[in-house]
Image: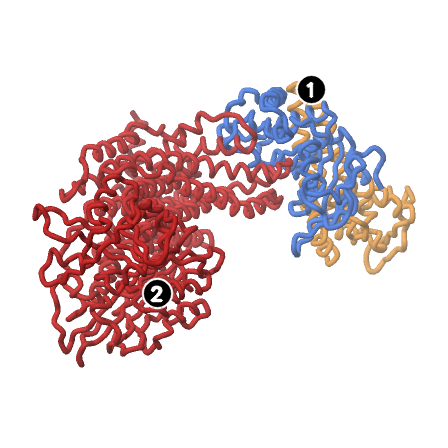
Chain colours: A red, B orange, C blue
Amino acid sequence: MSLDTRAKGHTETAAPHPGHTPPASVRARARDLVLGIRFAVGGGRAGWARTILTAVGVGLGVALLLGAASVPNLLQHRDDRSVARSDAGQFDGKDRRRSDSSVLVRGADTDFRDSTVAGRVLRAEGKHPVLPPGLDKIPADGEMVVSPALRDLLDSPEGKLLKERFGAYRVTGTIGDPGLVHPKELYFYTGSDALTQAKGGHRVAKFGYKQPPEPLDPVLVVLVVLGCVVLLTPVIIFIGTAVRFGGDRRDKRLAALRLVGADARAVRRIAAGESLCGALLGLVLGGLAFLALRELLGVFDVWKLSAFASDVTPVPGLAVLVLLAVPLTAVVVTLISLRAVSIEPLGVFRNAKPRKRRIWWRVLMPVVGIGILLSSGRLAGDLTPPVYAIGLGATLTLIGLAALLPWLVEAAVARLRGGPVPWQLAIRRLQLSSGTAARAVSGITVAVAGAIALQMMFGAMHDDFNRVTDNDPGRAKLQVLADVGDGELAEQMIDKFRTTKGVENVIGTVVSYVVKPGKLKNADDIRPTTELTVGTCANLRELARIDSCEDGDTFVVHTGDADMNDWVDEAARPGKPVDLNSVSWDEPGHRHMPWTLPADSPTVKARPDPRGDMHDGIFATYGAISPSKLVDASTNAMIQVDPDVRDNEEYVRNAAARIDPFLDVMTLRAVERDKQYASIQTGLQIGAMATMVLIAASMLVSMLEQLRERRRLLAALTAFGTRRGSMAWSVLWQTAIPVALGLALAVAGGLGLGFVMVRMIEKSVADWWIFLPLTSAGAVLVAVVTLLSLPPLWRMMRPDGLRTE
Amino acid sequence: MSIGHTLLGLLESGPRHGYDLKRTFDEKFGHDKPLHYGQVYSTMSRLLKNGLVEVDGIETEGGPERKRYAITDAGITDVETWLATPEKPEPYLQSTLYTKVVLALLTDRDASEMLDSQRAEHLRLMRILTDRKRKGDLADQLICDHALFHLEADLRWLELAAARLNKLAEEVRSA
Amino acid sequence: MTPAGSLLTASGLRKTYGPTTALDGADFSIHPGEVVAVMGPSGSGKSTLLHCLAGIVKPDEGSITYNGRELAGLPDAALSALRRSEFGFVFQFGQLVPELTCVENVALPLRLNGARRKDAEQTARTWMERLEVDDLLGKRPGEVSGGQGQRVAVARALATNPRVLFADEPTGALDSLNGERVMELLTDAARSTNAAVVLVTHETRVAAYSDREIVVRDGRSRDMERAV
């Protein structure tokens, strides 16, 4: 009874004490926060180190987030400029009248080594031509205006071969920024009086066109949603980890504050203030880093990625979100991390038995996620996709995987026993506190799982673009095409290319279509049509199995497919005529041009050309038919190059430019890859690896913290003769085990998610081994973290640590 | 504590009157308990009898006659031996040890040597006691512990004294 | 120079850390089965002397002979091997691996020497019994008291049957009762295996467990036996 009253009286007397007033006044709270901030910046070297560590971590995250928030603007601005310079007449199909302002335009893109050099040939038709953006006049005949990057390339020794290609032109100006998509773009405009509509030029009345609003491809929407989740979740996880940097030391400092009278809540607020300070500093650092990096994007061309600084502007709404969410995350994470410890005046106590991690909600998340994805049907055609459902499903799956990891690590190491000493040390360490490592690695898990799923989707879609062609690079590697059928040109091409450096052989032919003349039985029938290929005996032999051939000979060529053979035979009837002007029977106003296929034309079998294609139809030598008679023919050279000659392709392109600047040169490769998809795939892998590096950095910091904390122990272990190697292995295992588990989970989860998503877009999985590069990156990362931990480890293992502080 | 040895030691720096000896003694060692004249004279007569001091002269300037004493060679040897012999470690040694340290310093002898040998003697006894304690019953242990704690206190004092010898030497010599 | 029959001898050791001189011509010797206390005020170089003797730190000058072998020229790997197999160590605190259980901690040096886990833990158990801490086998260092932890540390130091046990303030963090118990067990165990003990301490009551005392002052050692 008396005890009770005394206890009561005690609390009452204690109540007025400012630190103990529950609930604290707003002023007291503000004071605690400010105190925390003062600790963050005024806490001596240790305090600063912690604040800076956090700030750098948060800053990195913020810079990335701001970058992500700028992507919509970046794409928009690039797209705007790309549209603004495109020729309006190209797409609406209307015929433009020649006028004082009209301009003839022809695409003249070329490749130089592994870059594309895009450009157009212009010819003004009047005195006041319309101008594409970035030009102040249409270049005159023989003039060339280039982008700054192309100018640099042409002026450099590396660009010597390219300069040769443009030998017919002299550079007279530079394209202004509004005419370029990005600062490192290789782009040019040349002027040529030789350009006519017949030479492929088309007339434009103005540059740029109003783009009809186009709904995003549903598949693309899903990809974008997934991409955001994949790239941003690890960043957020990383920020969360960064805020925890140096937490143990801070807790000790807070304990000292408890000793001088701060209550538990005040201590939490002070900690929150400290984190807030780090996070705010991080915001500033991140902002500065972002500004610096976007300037760098204009100077360096990293992975073909450059951008005008002014294009990289965050969407205001998203920027505000970043500015608010990051400090909030910092405070929330700090408060959550403090839940696991109790800070008492005499020290910091980990809550003795941490709650066992419950598995049900961790498993539930990915299961529900996959469930949502499975039930949202398939994305086919024009149906508006259930974007939110898909986004939610994918997000739940990925975050669920991240949540599953700490449990998995805990469960896995709990079952491990024995093994050599380093292994035992690592396992035991993880058994006691796997949280830090698992949290960091969960960022990797999300990034890798997401990257795998995305790559599988791209891979599946890519399959459409990425067919394995039958090109036989042993026989040819380049194809040069001219829009005119010109036997002389074909001969010239053969001659010129044959003497070009690096060329081993050339097949040159003139190709056109011919039809069976006369009225059709049924007006709706398709008129029998076949291909007419004209070339020398030697060239024709490359395309068909011809035994004897003399100039003047003709052949009917079959591929071996019965239906196709019959189709050929309907038009190619030896002794009967074909019409060389294929349109003359279907469109009025065209002259018939009959030509009789000699009756002695033998039927032979085709052989695949260097591209792998089989050509059937009529093969004729120049003596049998002059290419000048052909209508709408094209001249075609297939060029076989010596793979050992460096820049062989460039020599061919230069030779082609010398023959005729309007020749199109195509490169044939064993696998024809769609470049854009290749770059997306590369981008994804780079993104995932960048995330891994980020996470590795935070793992390294935690590792160093842990080492510093156990300086004394390490010195003692050295004293009784522990080999450095043993400790190094233990450090390695300590990183490797969570990363391995995280990657295993990521691979399983990513393949599962990828499979479901691929099924959703009604494609099939192209490559199940897509995760290999990422897992090897994971192994490299473990090695790097370990290696970087070694020098401090050696230092900690020195006997200095034994001297009492 | 041996007053005889102390007075002998004081005489080493030069002949003195009995009164002079008392005053110096009181100043340096008699912080809590001044020496009686009777004690001085009876001690001096014992030392005279043993041949450790001799009468250097007698003054009679307007008062009672005053003998001036000087130390003999035998006296110097006696002081030497006394200083070099560690005291049997026993309680309340401090005043004796302190006197020895100051005298050693006054007579330009190596005080640290003296302290170290005292320290070794203490530790020797502590080893014996520790050993007895380990083999003995609880009563033995308690008794030994009591002695050990006292010895430890002395040793601590010795260490402190050794660490402060230089400072003490300055003080003693300037006085 | 080497006194007859001595196991570990050092002479003329000099060691400086930057501007501070930790050892300035220190000598030392110990016989098998002997317990030698190294005393001296703090900062006098006691610990440095121990570190030099144990081959943890290389002295700038002077020679250290263990069992007739000069340690000065040995490479780090050889010294580590020596420490693993011939020496044992007890420090004031912070030497037990917090993640390992007590028995695993005691078994650790045996395992580092290549013993199989089972054998190592069996030996560890015997030593923990001798040091009266066999009730702590499965506990982690964080769950036992300071005195118990030190006894575990002593068990670990002795588990490899070292010829020399280096103890640096082994009771520094303990109260006198616990400290004395640790000292009793330590010296008993060491004597029973004929291990020499180099005992660095500033407590005379701990030093009283020794057979002989060496005082280090200003980096110089003084053998108190000769002082008597």
Whether residue A552 is visible, yes or no, is yes
Q: Position of residue A682 (x, y in %)?
A: 36, 50
Q: Which element carries disc 1, helix, strand or loop?
A: loop
Q: Amino acid at mark 2?
A: Lys
Q: Position of residue A91 (x, y in %)?
A: 16, 61
Tell me what residue is drawn at x 81 percent, y 53 percent: B108
Q: Position of residue A627 (x, y in %)?
A: 27, 62
Q: Quadrant of the N terminus of chain A?
A: top left
Q: What whole-number distance in Å separates the C-alpha atoms at marks 2 and 1? A: 93 Å
Residue C187 versus residue A648 in the image, above or below: above
Q: Amino acid at mark 1?
A: Gly
Q: What number is the disc on residue A184? A: 2
Q: Which residue is mark 1?
A: B136
Q: Nearer the viewer, residue B3 or A225?
A: A225
Residue A4 versus residue A589 in the image, above or below: above
Quarter residue A639 falls in: bottom left
Q: Position of residue A622 (x, y in %)?
A: 32, 60
In the rendered structure, the answer to whether residue C38 lies left or right of residue A582 reads right
Q: Nearer the viewer, residue B103 or C210?
A: C210
Q: Residue furthest top?
A: B137
Q: Disc 1 is attached to a residue of which chain? A: B
